[in-house]
């Protein structure tokens, strides 16, 4: 099969389209014929091996799994001996490690049936970003009707879902994005938009009950000034920061500070969970949320997709198709 392979950590220039052996599913896995795969920050982190602490899990000197890609959608080609929920031909989406390929293995508990009203490309844009937004706005950070929610990075992959979910929950949503994304963010349900090139989140007299920060650049004191006295901040991802911990250092400081103050500061490390995939499945089938795709690329163009992710400020998700 053809796959996007990487032999060493580094930039997208090290990605190579090659013919490699088709994977064989383990007993608790299925083999998915990949039709489309999502492109998000998690793919870049896996490719670059940054922050360096992630290499403890991924491989210290080189990627343990050389095929890039993290989520996808396609048809079940084969099932492992212990798998009973799926059969050959089922259309599925979810977490498929190594999804920048014509075939990829997936744990049976990390995929679900694809919503019939979505294309494979749309379904591939759901798993990581959709689950991250869902988990960011859950528990104590799930907004109540009428509360104010600020979504920083509102035009990106996670942000587009966070705006839709917060609106669905009845919140008054303010999105933070660049000038090119303002109309897009409003179309998703945001009542107000802050252009980060002209305004600061603390310029408004309003304070927010929930802040979801997808951008990873603003210091904690700035974010806390934008919160209500008992509001909740959810830090998503680990952008910026030092080479070793990256943006995770800011999240760690938030977690250590939270027990000492009235505000609730969360650092979100999202996990692939079947129940969340089922929730996303139901929400999209009912038309309550919808994937937003900025651009699609062919498999051979995966390096260009990652370059656009880092430099182009995509509105919604980028998707690679096979």
Image (cartoon, grey):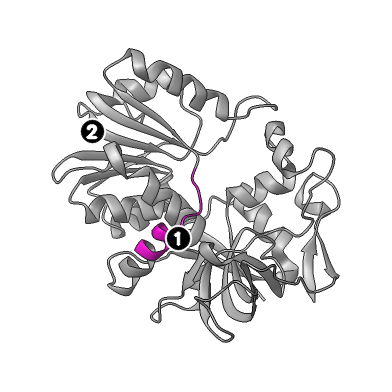
Quadrant in which the N terminus appears: bottom right
Instruction: Give the residues drawn in magenta, as a range.
Output: 270-279
Residue 103: image quadrant is bottom right
- Farthest residue to the left: give it: 146
Residue 180 visible in this rendered orientation of the protein: no
Residue at numbered disc 1: 274
**Of marks 1 and 2, which one's residue comes earlier in the chain?**
2
Q: Which mark is residue 9?
A: none
> Residue at 54% of width from left, 50% of height from top?
313
* Residue 111 point in image, percent of width and height: 51, 67
Query: Is 100 situated left or right of 289 in this image?
Result: right
* Residue 272 point in image, percent of width and height: 51, 54
Residue 41 visible in this rendered orientation of the protein: yes
Query: Is 19 situated left or right of 213 in this image?
Result: right
> Residue at 23% of width from left, 42% of height from top?
143
- What kind of element bears circle 2? strand
Residue at numbered disc 2: 209
* Residue 285 point in image, percent of width and height: 32, 74
> Residue at 37% of width from left, 38% of height from top?
212
In the rendered image, residue 272 lying in the magenta stretch gets the answer yes
- What kind of element bears circle 1? helix
Front position in the image: 197 or 139:
139
Front position in the image: 196 or 260:
260
Query: Is 62 situated left or right of 182 in this image?
Result: right
- Farthest residue to the front: give it: 82
* Residue 64 point in image, percent of width and height: 79, 50
């Amino acid at each position: 099969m053809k796959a996007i392979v990487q032999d060493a950590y580094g930039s997208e220039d090290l990605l190579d389209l090659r013919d490699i052996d088709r994977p064989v599913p383990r007993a608790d896995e299925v083999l998915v014929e990949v039709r489309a795969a999502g492109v998000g920050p998690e793919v870049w982190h896996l490719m670059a091996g940054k922050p360096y602490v992630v290499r403890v899990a991924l491989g210290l000197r080189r990627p343990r799994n050389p095929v890039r890609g993290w989520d996808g959608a396609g048809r079940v080609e084969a099932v492992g001996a212990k798998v009973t929920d799926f059969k050959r031909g089922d259309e599925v989406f979810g977490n498929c490690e190594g999804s920048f390929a014509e075939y990829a293995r997936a744990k049976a508990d990390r995929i679900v049936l694809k919503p019939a009203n979505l294309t494979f490309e749309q379904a591939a844009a759901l798993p990581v970003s959709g689950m991250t937004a869902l988990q960011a706005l859950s528990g104590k950070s799930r907004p109540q009707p009428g509360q104010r929610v600020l979504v920083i990075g509102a035009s990106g992959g996670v942000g587009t879902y966070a705006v839709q979910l917060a609106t669905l929950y009845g919140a008054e949503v303010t999105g933070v994005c660049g000038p090119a994304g303002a109309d897009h963010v409003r179309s998703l349900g945001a009542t107000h938009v802050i252009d980060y090139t002209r305004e600061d989140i603390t310029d408004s007299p309003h304070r927010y009950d929930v802040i979801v920060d997808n951008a990873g650049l603003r210091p904690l004191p700035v974010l806390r000034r934008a919160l209500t006295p008992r509001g909740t901040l959810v830090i998503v991802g680990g952008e910026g920061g030092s080479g070793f911990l990256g943006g995770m250092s800011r999240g760690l400081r938030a977690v250590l500070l939270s027990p000492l103050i009235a505000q609730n500061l969360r650092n979100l490390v999202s996990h692939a969970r079947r129940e969340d995939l089922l929730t996303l499945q139901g929400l999209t089938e009912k038309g309550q949320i919808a994937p937003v795709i900025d651009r699609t690329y062919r498999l051979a163009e995966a390096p260009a997709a990652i370059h656009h992710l880092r430099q182009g400020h995509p509105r919604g998700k980028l998707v690679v198709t096979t």
